[in-house]
Image: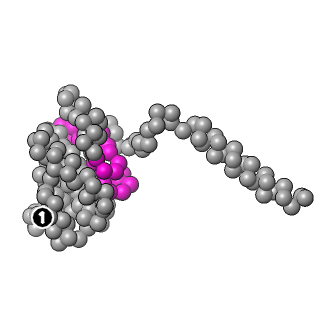
Amino acid sequence: MRRFLLPLGLFAALVVVLAFGIYNAPRNGSKEILSPLLGKPAPAFALPKLLEPGATYDSGSMRGGWHLVNVWGSWCVECRAEHATLLQIKGEGRVPIVGIDWKDDDATANAWLAQLGNPYDTVVTDHSGRTAIDWGVYGAPESFLVDPAGIVVEKQIGAMSPEDWQTKFLPHLARKP
C-alpha cells in the first residue's frame, strides 16, 4: 500500500499545479504573447535585398513613416495563408510593407513571390536568422507595425487576417505617433 503513496502524491501535486495555472490564465480568451518590443525602438538591421542582388536595405530607411514589417518564408504554410491579406494591405496603399525572408533559399523565395504576387515594397533576406532573433520572432509569419519614430506599436504572431489588420493595426495608423 505504501508503494502507491509516492506516485499518488506526485499526481496530486501535478493536479494542483495545473489547476493553479488554469485558474490564473487570462480571462478574456486572449492567446496573445506580448512582445517585449512593444513601445520600444525597432531593432536595427542592414540586410541584402532579395530582388536586387548586391543592394542592401537599412532599417533606418523606415524612419519618418509608418511601416509594416512581415517575417516570412517560402517554406512557411501559414505565410501562404496570410499572403492574400498582405496583397490586400498593399493594395490599400496605407503603409509600405517590408518583408524579411527568414532562413530561406533566394531562388525559392523569388519563385514564390513570382507565383503568388509580391505584397512587399522591399524584401530583404535574413539567411542566418539573426535579425529575426533581434525582433523576437517565435516563428513565421510574424508582423510588426513600426511608427514614424521607429517604435514598434503592434505585433501579430501567426497569419494576419483581414480582421487582425482592421482591429489591431489600422487604429494605430489613424492616430499620430
At label 1, counting other C-alpha atoms closer than 10 Å, the crowd grade (few under 14, some 14-19, many 20 or more) is few
Name the quadrant containing residue 30: top left
Residue 117 occupies quadrant: bottom left
Left or right of residue 1: residue 100? left
Does the segment drawn in magenta span residue 157?
Answer: yes
Q: Position of residue 122 (x, y in %)?
A: 13, 54
In this rendering, the answer to whether 26 lies above or below 141 is above
Q: Magenta stretch: residue 65 in it?
A: no
Which residue is drawn at the image coordinates 64% and 40% (left, top)?
Answer: 20
Q: Position of residue 109 (x, y in %)?
A: 19, 66
Q: Quadrant of the C terminus?
A: top left
| Residue stretch in magenta | 135-160
Q: Position of residue 25 (x, y in %)?
A: 54, 38
Task: Judge by depth and name the residue closer to the eye, 146 or 143.
Answer: 143
Query: Can you name the residue that lies furthest to the right here?
Result: 1
Give amino acid for label 1.
Answer: Ala
- Does the rendering let one see residue 126? no
For the point 58% across and 37% down, the residue is: 24
| Residue for badge 1 | 114
Q: Quadrant of the N terminus?
A: bottom right
Q: Is residue 27 left or right of residue 9?
A: left
